[in-house]
Amino acid sequence: MLRNFLMTSLLLLIAACGQGEQQSKMADVGLVYVHAGHLIDVEQGMVLDDRLIVIKGERIIDVKPWTEEAALSDVIDWSAYTVMPGMIDGHTHLVGDIQSEDVLAPLKISFDEDVAMGEVNALKTLEAGFTTVIDVGVYQVFTDVALRDKINSGEVPGPRMMVAGAYITKPWGGGEVVGKDAGVDIPPQFRAGVVTSPEEVREKVRYLLDGGADFIKLIATGAVLTVGTEPGEPELSEEEMRAAVEEAAKRGKYVTAHAHGAEGIKMAVRAGVRSIQHGSLADEEALQMMKEHGTWLVADIYNGDYINDVGTREGWPEETMRKNRETTDTQRAVFRRAVELGVNIAYGTDSGVYPHGDNAKQMPYMVRYGLSPMQAIQSATIWGARSMSLEKDVGSIAPGKYADMIAVSNEVLEDVSVLEHVDAVMKGGKLVP
């Protein structure tokens, strides 16, 4: 009887082991493995050699040293490359056509045409290694929401998008298609964010968030590219900007401010905005305030050269070219000083002014004007994620986060311009063709 009992127990144990092995194999079904020759740990600011990245579905479940046993599985072999997180551009305009000499061009494109152009631009951006973008405003309301939703549904390829829905701007201000002297009627869908009081600001913020916006974009000063406005001049009042911040906060949303001029920047910081876009004419006091409040600077320090070259060749309005000359060098000096002071820096380029897919052309400028190569990469990854509280999902290669990553040349920390030509891109565990 004892012998029968032992035999039965042994058979049960063997069966259990077999079942466990089968379950273990079943658990491996659907896993994706990536062998990284070098991995940039942007949170620690260091490079790790020979790493195995394990992915299940869209997310990373483990990052560990490479072992020979791992070679038994199907592996995406990036052992000859440096692997880093997919990059984040904190200032894009994916919808519509790029900037041209025709200041009224946005009025000549339908909603569907705007979105269709955005689909092309989104793919170029993703293929360039930018797997997340903060899309900071459109002229035609909610075209960016439509593009984001098409990407999220899988209908079209593109980066993860956070969108603003439209601009909150004063009448004929920097967020309008053109200033008041244009002598043309602007259709209402292009003026959805126009406000004249704090009460209207609150109303427009609710309208945009109800329509699908992820955050709010304020036009605090005039703009380089909006004819009839001056970058150094404040436009929205501090009270109006505070109303936007308060109303957005009720929904757990952030506010960013387009602001070139020093006074407009200070007003926006006091009002509680999350970040300043451009910051071209900031003075020492404005930068010290940003440092004190933890306000992020997103400065498009490549853009001025592009505007000067293309604008001169194509005959852009002289007013635009003058304003570009007056802000380009100053913005770069401001950026360098911001780095020295330790102001929070997030990478942002204003793509849509220049051709989409060229987003990484700004990377060498970030190094030239004060950041180390590692810091420049951090600005376009983990710092960019933190600037909009996205770090739980993107910004680094770590368990729990989306498997958004790129493979690049091993010389990337010696020459960040290699990021202009990435070797491979993955978004959500899937390779981008």
Image (cartoon, rainbow, N blue to C red):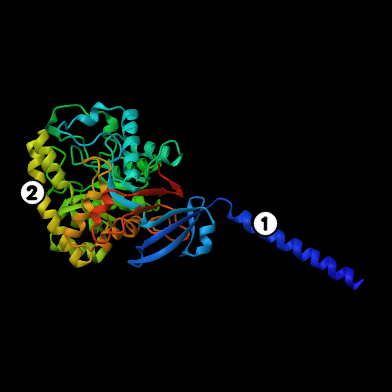
Q: Residues within 10 Å of mark 2 (few under 14, many from 20)?
A: some
Q: Quadrant of residue 372?
A: bottom left
Q: Is residue 272 above or below residue 216?
A: below
> Can the viewer see residue 389?
no
> Can the viewer see residue 109?
yes
**Residue 278 in picture, x, y percent from top left:** 20, 51
SS under mark 2? helix
Residue that mark 1 sits on? 22
SS under mark 1? helix
Between discs 1 and 2, the one toward the N terminus: 1
**Which of the two marks, 1 or 2, is nearer to us in this view?**
1
**Residue 399 in picture, x, y percent from top left:** 47, 60
Q: Residues within 10 Å of mark 1 (few under 14, many from 20)?
A: few
**Residue 1 in picture, x, y percent from top left:** 92, 71
Q: Residue at x 15, y 35 (%)?
A: 179
Quadrant of image for the C terminus: top left
Q: Is residue 108 above or below residue 78?
A: above
**Residue 236 in picture, x, y percent from top left:** 20, 47
Q: Identify residue type, mark 2.
A: Glu
